Amino acid sequence: MGSFNTSFRQGFFLVGFSDFPQLELLLSVLISIFYSLTLFGNSTIIILSQLDARLQMPMYFFLCHLSFLDLCYTTSIVPQLLINLQGYDRTISYGGCVAQLFLFLALATTESVLLVVMAFDRYVAVCRPLHYTTIMHPVLCLSLAIVSWVGGFMNSLIQTSLMMAVPLCGHRLNHFFCEIPSLLKLACEDTEGTGAKMFVVRVVFLIFPITLILSSYANIAQAVLKTKSMAGCKKALGTCGSHLVVVSMFYGAAMYTYLQPKGTYSESKGKFVALFYIIVTPMLNPLIYTLRNKDVKGALWKVLGRATDLG
C-alpha cells in the first residue's frame, strides 16, 4: 500500500466511455436492460433448482453456483458503471478500487475453476453413465465447489497483493472499473518482474483450466464416436453443447484481456471486451442453458403453471 502515492488514497478518475460520448446514452440503456435480464435469468435458475426435484442433480448444483457467481461479479461492477455513464460520479476511492479488483478477480477465477468442474461432471455423465451417481456423490460435489471458491479467492489475494505493490503515477484510469491491465498502464517504473509473476498466475488459472476442459471433451468425443450411434451423438451434444458455448465465451474474452503483453494491450478495445464478459456473458448463460435443456424448461413451465392455477 505504501507504493501508492498520496493521490491514490484519494481515489481514481474512471474515464469509462467518456471518450465515446455519443455512445454513453445508448450504452446506459442497453446495460440497464442486460443487467435486469441477468438478475432475472440467473435468479430464476437458482430458484428453479431449489423448487423442482428433477433439478436436484450435480449438473444443476454447479449451474446454481455459476448463476450465483454471475450475479455477484456483475453486481460488483454494473451499478457504478451506470453512475459513470450518466456522468454523476466518475471517481472511485482507493479502498473501493482495491475491493472491486479483489472481488472481481476472486469471482472470475472461481468461475474459471467451476467451468472445469462442470466439464468433469459432463465427462462422467457421458463416459461413465453407469457410475455417475456413485462418482458424483454429494460430498464430492460440495468439495469441488469449495475448491473452486477457495482457489478463486487465493488467486485474487495473490494478484491483488502484487498489484498493490506496484508504484503508480497519475489518477486517470482509462477503464470503467479497476482492472489489472489498465492499472499497470499507470505504473511509474518498469514492472517487468511483477508483471511476469502476475502473468504466470494468470496462465495457471486460464491455460491450465482450458486444457483440462478440452481434455475432458476430447475423451467425450472419443467415447461418443466409439458408440457409432446417432442418438448417442445427439444426447452428448445436448449434454455438453451449452457448456462448450459458455466456456468459449468466457475463456475467449479472458485470454484476450489477461494474456496480452502489457505493451500491446489496447485500453479502448479492452473496455468493450470487458463489457462482453461482464454484461453479455452473464445475461446469456441462463438462456444458453435453459433453451437447450428440457429439465430446466420443464421446471419453468411447472412453476408457471402453479402460479397460473393460484392466480
Image: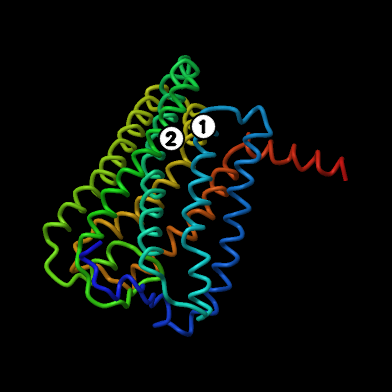
In the rendered structure, which amino acid carries the disc numbered 2? Met
Whichever of callouts 2 and 1 sits on the residue coming sooner in the sequence is 1
227 in relation to 184, above or below = above
Asked whether 197 or 61 is in front, the reply is 197
How far across and down, in percent of the image, does residue 138 sit?
50, 22
**Numbered disc 2: secondary structure:** helix
Q: Residues within 10 Å of mark 2 (few under 14, many from 20)?
A: many
Q: Secondary structure at mark 1?
A: helix
In this view, 259 is above or below 146:
below
Residue ranking furthest to the bottom: 22
Q: Is residue 233 left or right of residue 214?
A: right
Between 186 and 311, the residue placed more toward the observer is: 186
Amino acid type at circle 1 is: Met
Question: Residue at the spot x=46%, y=62% of the render?
Answer: 77
Q: Residue at x 40, y 28 (%)?
A: 123
Q: Are marks 2 and 1 in contact (CB under 8 Å)?
A: yes
Give residue 59's mark.
Answer: 1
10 Å crowding of disc 1: few (<14), some (14-19), many (20+): some
Q: Which mark is residue 235?
A: none
| Picture quadrant of residue 161 | bottom left
> In the rendering, at what x and y percent does residue 270 appear?
34, 67
Residue at position x 87%, y 41% from top? 310
- Quarter of the N terminus within the rendering: bottom left
Q: Please tell me whether residue 7 is drawn above or below residue 299 in the rendered image.
A: below
For mark 2, what is the residue? 118
Rendered location of residue 160, percent (x, y): 29, 55
